[in-house]
Image: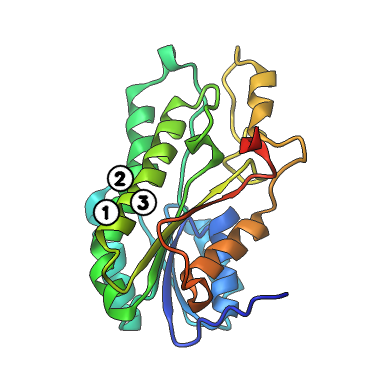
Amino acid sequence: MAIAIDMAGKAALVTGAASGVGRATARKLADAGACVCLVDINAEALAETADLLRDSRALAHVADLSDPDACRRVVDTAVAKFGRLDALCNVAGTVTFAQSHTMKRADWDRTIAINLSAPFFLSQAAIPHLIEAEGAIVNVASFTAFQGGAYAAAYCASKAGLVNMTKALAMEYIRQPIRINAVAPGGMLTHMGPGFIDIPDGLDGELLQRFSSLRGFVEVDDVADMICLLVSPAGRSYHGACISIDAGITAG
């Protein structure tokens, strides 16, 4: 049975909107009738996403989300443009594959800043508006929140923190008209995957293959569909949940 996603008259903010899950989520929300604030550090690719949404109300905002002040400005910009905020989709993420004993501190710090701190500061700025609109937050975590991944200690730590932060916020605001959830995808064919970024020499390729399921990669559109469900009125019964979409990676 198909679930109708109706976001007419609502406004959403999607980070990581220049590509992958972020772009797919933005397109699906726009198709469902939402006004969408598109956020990414990649200005050129973000403009391409905006062009795909040219028949809807969309705002492209270039920002480096490792800066907490930039996170607050993003929310302020979206509310100023649309007059409301109904959905915050924290999709933006980064990963650096490296042996832990050689990983640069700057890579660790940036991974934590973008994958964990940015969703917090974006949520912090958005929550008052989302309570007013009876809206929702969805954080994009990863199967590595529950299962270690070789050469990705910072990424795994950030995603595990993001899942528990989601649950903590859900409990804190359980008496308020806001829903806060997460999704945990498995390996996908996006620009962040091992096949699309530079992998340092000397890493064990067999261990890196464990980032994908025996059933293959997870479809980006499937993850975007779940995000849209969770931020829409159709997701009204979800709160404090983390939905695994990993083709069985964490099953055993």
In the orientation shown, which residue stands out farthest toward the bottom?
9
In the orientation shown, which residue stands out farthest toward the right?
215
Quadrant in the picture for the C terminus: top right
Quadrant in the picture for the N terminus: bottom right
- On the image, the x and y values in percent for residue 228 come to 54, 68
Residue at (27, 66) in percent of width and height: 127
- On the image, the x and y values in percent for residue 17 come to 50, 60
Which label is found at residue 197?
A: none
Q: CA distance from mark 3 to mark 2?
A: 15 Å
Residue 204 seen in the current view = yes
Check disc 1 and report the residue beneath it. Answer: 121
Per the image, label 3 sits on a secondary structure element best described as: helix
Closer to the camera, 145 or 207?
A: 145
Residue 65 seen in the current view = no
Sequence-first tag of 3 and 1? 1
Q: Do callouts 1 and 2 mark residues in contact (Cβ within 8 Å)? A: yes
